[in-house]
Image (cartoon, coloured by chain):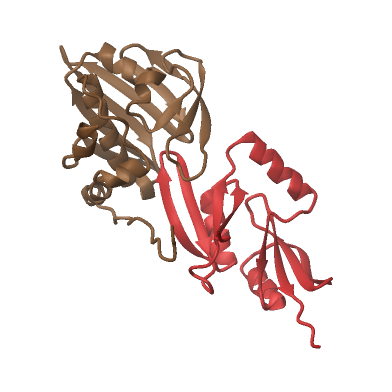
Amino acid sequence: MTDHEQYTPGPPSGAQIRKDGEKWTLILVRELRHSPEKVWQALTDPAHLREWAPFEADGSLGTIGTAVKLTTVGAPSPHVTETRVRRADAPKALEYNWGDHDMRWELEDLGGGTRLTLWTNIGRRFIAMGAAGWHICFDVLDHLLSGIPIGRIVGPEAMKFGWKRLNAEYAKQFGMETLGWPSQKGRTN
Amino acid sequence: MKIKLTSVYVDDQNKALRFYTEVLGFTKKTDFSQGPFRWLTVVSPEEPDGAELQLALNNNPVAKTYQQAIFQQGQPAAMFSTDDVKGDYQRAKARGAEFTMPPTDVTGSTIAMLKDTCGNLIQLTQLARYSR
């Protein structure tokens, strides 16, 4: 998988943060050269999600009211949460939660392309980490939609592909201290 | 193979971090998130490279049931070792800890039990040192 090995994320782009009281929201915008219908499928179909998203879904996220189990990929101990799809207006708006993160997706038709926006709440401490992780996921999504899938890059994989640099750059953009990767001193394997 | 990590379920990771650092005096070792998953561990400052305690969010029904059941039985979710259980009892009490058992002599040790504010009982154990 040469394209996977050669992937390097670009500089930070399309991310903002918002604070309402104690609640922090990460807002990510990505313009894609693909129709909203195609993007919608990638956001809701488990087989497509498996190619780019940071979680596995055991069912489609495309129908309101459906209960879906989401498994965080590569978490250091098994992590499964159940969600119920709150809104599914294909191919425009999708809402569900991933654990205690609200996920609100909006797909705006740009005439042949789509402006994809994600609003998600993340604690202040982890907001740059989240921006870096989703940045890489969106790059992989773009490749998938273009018909040249490079394979999901999440969890430990993301560490190999510029996540640390992006984390530091987003932290700088957001005016926050960089939380370095934890010390692994004393770890022998 | 080594024992380097153990975990307790907690109902609130921020509250747990406060209790385990400010009341018990441990230090934060690792804290990162992956999506909604947060990996959070503390370690004893006396053994910074010693065993870590993971404060795991209790967000599934099976874990909740288990946590509540052992709490109701009076079973500690974790036990920590000390050389001065009476001193630790006084210090933790001064920082607001609620003990369910003051330092009490039992076979081979002196123990005390306190609530961790996150759904658990924690036992402090001082092993008895018998002179020959």
Residue B93 lies, with reference to residue B57, above or below; the image says below
Which quarter shows the C terminus of chain A? bottom left
Q: Position of residue B119 (x, y in %)?
A: 66, 49
Indicate the colour of chain B.
red
Which quarter shows the N terminus of chain A? top left
Q: Residue at point 77% right, 69% down?
A: B102
Task: Please identify the quarter of the rendering in which residue A144 is found.
Answer: top left
Taking depth in this image into account, of A69 and A131 the one nearest to the observer is: A69
Q: Is residue A168 left or right of residue B29?
A: left
Task: Please identify the quarter of the rendering in which residue B125 is found.
Answer: bottom right
Residue, far bottom? B132
Q: Where is residue B52 in the image (x, y as percent from the top left)?
A: 53, 60
Q: Position of residue B20 (x, y in %)?
A: 57, 61
Taking depth in this image into account, of A19 and B84 the one nearest to the observer is: B84
Taking depth in this image into account, of B7 and A99 the one nearest to the observer is: B7
Q: Is residue B49 left or right of residue A132?
A: right
Q: Is residue A174 visible?
A: yes
Task: Please identify the quarter of the rendering in which residue A60 is found.
Answer: top left
Q: Residue at point 76% right, 69% down?
A: B111
Q: Position of residue B38 (x, y in %)?
A: 46, 46
Indicate the colour of chain A.
brown
Q: Residue at point 53% right, 67% down?
A: B50
